[in-house]
Amino acid sequence: MKYISFIGCIIFFTSCIKEAGLLQNRVELVKGPTDESTSLPFLKVGEDHQLYLSWVKEIDDQASLYFASLKQGNNWSDAEVIASGKNWFVNWADYPSISIDSKGNKISHYLTKSSTGIYSYDVNITISKNSHPWSSSLIPHNDQTPTEHGFATLLPMPNQTFTMVWLDGRNTGVPKSDDGHGQGAMTLRTANINLQGVLTEEKELDAYVCDCCQTSGALTSSGPVFVYRDRTKDEYRDISIVRKVKGQWTAPKTLFNDQWKIAGCPVNGPRIVAHRDQVAVAWFSAPNDVPQVKIIFSKDAGANFEAPIIIDDSNPLGRVDIAMDEKGTAFVSWLSFKNNKSQIKAIAVNKKGIIGNPIIVSEINSSRSSGFPQMELFENELYFAWTNTSKNQKNIDLARIKF
């Protein structure tokens, strides 16, 4: 594994530095709380203003989900077990997550197999209230079908509840209708969960979506918003957004008309971030077989978006992540691929479209085993986490970029 450091390291136009405050300092590899045989990292800044990392450790047929939080001086808390089991569905793209509200209450999700079928599994939710032990797991979908349920996103709400969405395959075991819609399709569903594990407001948000791309969500001043890869009967798979405004969900709306036509799922979901009414979304697409990483901004909580900005169109692999500061400057990370070499890259983009030069965070194996690199902005530093497979064993590496 090679790590690229820069001294005085990134050359920007003067106007970019002044207006966007883009990345300028060195990439630094930092010690994390994980040990060997670990993968599937997930970074999250909680509403309690702490940085959290969750990950999976596998020993033989046992899988365990852990988490830790960052303390002062770049020291991590001791790793704590969230859940363990022998019937888990551990997948490179459908990784567990953790979400934290302003009081420090935590909710986490992971996947367990529901039958002997390869792709029949359930979302499992567990809750830790007031730092108490994690609760017994509950399943947020009540269909009890041996089908796919996953790619969940959990958002903390101000009233000590969590809003979640997930891809729900309850209809995929049913023959398709003549027009290809309704029956037989993967759906996007939502529910609210309180700290006692009670489910409310269960609803289908989209009846026909892409099968295996990650969902992503953010809380705006107008309410929660979620993005996901949609699907049409003609197999166009572009990014859509749904918003909850004044207690009501909006109809799905295409974020941007890429018109990417692809017969199968690309396993490459979007990521969204918000600060009050400022929203930014990063995603991968390949219209006309031209791979691209893009970003798009909204200044009205996701109701409308400006024209997208192309971040990379030189054969990127995608696997994007995004963060944003209070001034509306966004930071995008993704996997690039050039000269048979894949790298985690990051760049800063402001809402006016000014783009600085990308930096290289690390070289990385482009195989599925390396998963989806994570990025979060915390106390004026960008933190990264990814699965390192260079030593014939999966381990999680961490890096940060100081502004």
Image (cartoon, helix red, strand yellow):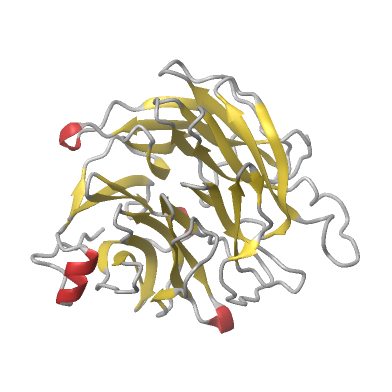
**Observer-nearest of 85 and 49:** 49
**Observer-nearest of 203 and 138:** 203
Q: Is residue 234 shown above or below 174?
A: below
Q: Is residue 183 shown above or below 180?
A: above
Q: Position of residue 339 (x, y in %)?
A: 34, 79
Q: Residue 81 lies in what quarter of the image?
A: top left
Q: Is residue 214 visible?
A: no
- The C terminus appears in which quarter of the rendering? bottom left
Q: Is residue 366 left or right of residue 63?
A: left
Q: Is residue 233 visible?
A: yes
Q: Position of residue 373 (x, y in %)?
A: 39, 54
Q: Position of residue 219 (x, y in %)?
A: 48, 45
Q: Position of residue 3 (x, y in %)?
A: 21, 59
Q: Residue 46 lies in what quarter of the image?
A: top left
**Observer-nearest of 193 and 260:** 193
Residue at 45%, 68% in the rendered image = 296
Residue at the extreme front: 246
How many discs appear? 0
Residue at 69%, 35% in the rendered image = 201
Q: Is residue 246 left or right of residue 169?
A: left
- The N terminus appears in which quarter of the rendering? bottom left
Residue at the extreme top: 132
Q: Is residue 247 shown above or below 262?
A: above
Residue at 65%, 42% in the rendered image = 190
Residue at 64%, 68% in the rendered image = 237
Q: Is residue 2 left or right of residue 384?
A: left
Residue at the extreme right: 178
Q: Is residue 320 shown above or below 137?
A: below
